[in-house]
Image: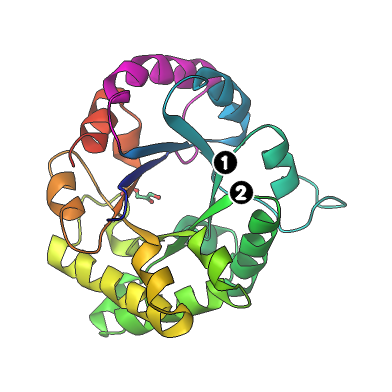
């Protein structure tokens, strides 16, 4: 049985004082869950959050990184830098980065390799646009994104990654994929991994659903055969709501 993982993606929200209050409030609410609880926070909150979650069951992730270790890349942050302060996870290839910051499958792949080299665990995002879904291309798009993201990795490295299926049309729109559709999409990603890396990796890898997850729909989504939890945007900004999602399965 795969464990359940609930990851919050705060995006560009939460000042350090707000982040600290959030952690103080949510800590007792989620302390008894067996599910893995992760908060992916802005760079400026990382250090505060890492201190705040000491002696709790909450893990901290970043939302992006550069693939080089260091050098002339003004404004960027490397895997080595994240690791040096104790960050455990990093979101790579979020659709907002693909859409607004020219993230490509090739740079996603480079970032994943660098993250793994520095023992950060990547949460790799894939997902189709509304137009691609209307053309019936969603399976093709997400399996291709998955293949290109993982290119050149061996099975042990792939096992350390999580994948998040986030259909772009469901992000921040209040439109959630039905649990059947989301489960089918995630099955197709798992099958692609089965073809590339075999049964063991496909059965072990954690694959999340993201896109308008809230406490009203999380139980149904997370109780399907292949959805192992969620990557939660807006609903991860309120401690009570996020805790409910964490405890819904
Ligand atoms: P929402 O949950 O706000 O739709 O955002 C999803 C997302 O992009 C998480 O990475």
Toward the viewer: 26 or 138?
26
Crowd tier of the residue under label 2, counting other residues whose Cα lies within 10 Å: few below 14, some 14–19, many 20 or above = many
Main SS type for the magenta part? helix
Crowd tier of the residue under label 1, counting other residues whose Cα lies within 10 Å: few below 14, some 14–19, many 20 or above = some
Q: Which of the 4 image quarters holds residue 42?
A: top right
Q: Which residue is mark 1?
A: 88
Whether 36 is drawn above or below 167: the answer is above
Whether 201 is drawn above or below 55: the answer is below
Please tell me which residue is depicted at 29% across the width and 55% down the height of the picture: 228
**Residue 171 image position (x, y, % from top left):** 32, 54
**Residue 236 image position (x, y, % from top left):** 34, 35
Task: State yes or no: Cβ of the residue under disc 2 lies below 8 Å from any atom of ligand 1.
Answer: no
Please tell me which residue is depicted at 40% across the width and 14% down the height of the picture: 24
| Proximity of marks 1 and 2: CB atoms separated by less than 8 Å | yes
**Residue 151 image position (x, y, % from top left):** 59, 77
Please tell me which residue is depicted at 35% across the width and 74% down the height of the picture: 189
Tell me the CA gap for discs 1 and 2.
Answer: 5 Å
Q: Is residue 248 left or right of residue 96?
A: left
Toward the viewer: 131 or 190?
190
The furthest residue to the right: 71
Please tell me which residue is depicted at 27% across the width and 58% down the height of the picture: 170
Q: Is residue 154 magenta?
A: no
Which range is magenta?
A: 10-34
**Residue 117 image position (x, y, % from top left):** 70, 57
- Mark 1 vs mark 2: which is more N-terminal? 1
Whether 225 is drawn above or below 6: the answer is below
Q: Which residue is mark 2?
A: 120
Q: Which of the 4 image quarters holds residue 249?
A: top left
Is residue 45 in view? yes
Q: Is residue 99 left or right of residue 216?
A: right
Q: Secondary structure at mark 2?
A: loop
């Amino acid at each position: 049985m795969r464990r359940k993982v609930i990851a919050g993606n705060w995006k560009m929200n939460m000042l350090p004082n707000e982040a600290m209050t959030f952690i103080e409030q949510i800590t007792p609410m989620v302390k008894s869950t067996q599910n893995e609880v992760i908060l992916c926070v802005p760079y400026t909150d990382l250090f505060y959050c890492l201190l705040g979650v000491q002696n709790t069951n909450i893990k901290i992730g970043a939302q992006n990184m550069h693939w080089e270790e260091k050098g002339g890349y003004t404004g960027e942050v490397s895997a080595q830098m994240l690791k040096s302060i104790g960050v455990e996870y990093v979101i790579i290839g979020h659709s907002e980065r693909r859409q607004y910051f020219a993230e490509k499958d090739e740079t996603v792949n480079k970032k994943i390799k660098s993250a793994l080299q520095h023992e950060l665990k990547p949460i790799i995002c894939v997902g189709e646009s509304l137009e691609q879904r209307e053309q019936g291309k969603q399976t093709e798009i997400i399996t291709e994104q998955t293949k290109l993201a993982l290119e050149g990795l061996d099975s042990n490295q792939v096992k350390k990654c999580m994948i998040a299926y986030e259909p772009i049309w469901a992000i921040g729109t209040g439109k959630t994929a039905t649990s059947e559709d989301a489960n089918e999409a995630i099955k197709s990603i798992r099958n692609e991994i089965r073809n590339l890396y075999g049964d063991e990796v496909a059965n072990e890898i954690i694959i999340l659903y993201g896109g308008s997850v809230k406490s009203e729909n999380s139980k149904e989504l997370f109780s399907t055969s292949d959805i192992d939890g969620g990557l939660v945007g807006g609903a991860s900004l309120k401690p009570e709501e996020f805790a409910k999602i964490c405890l819904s399965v």
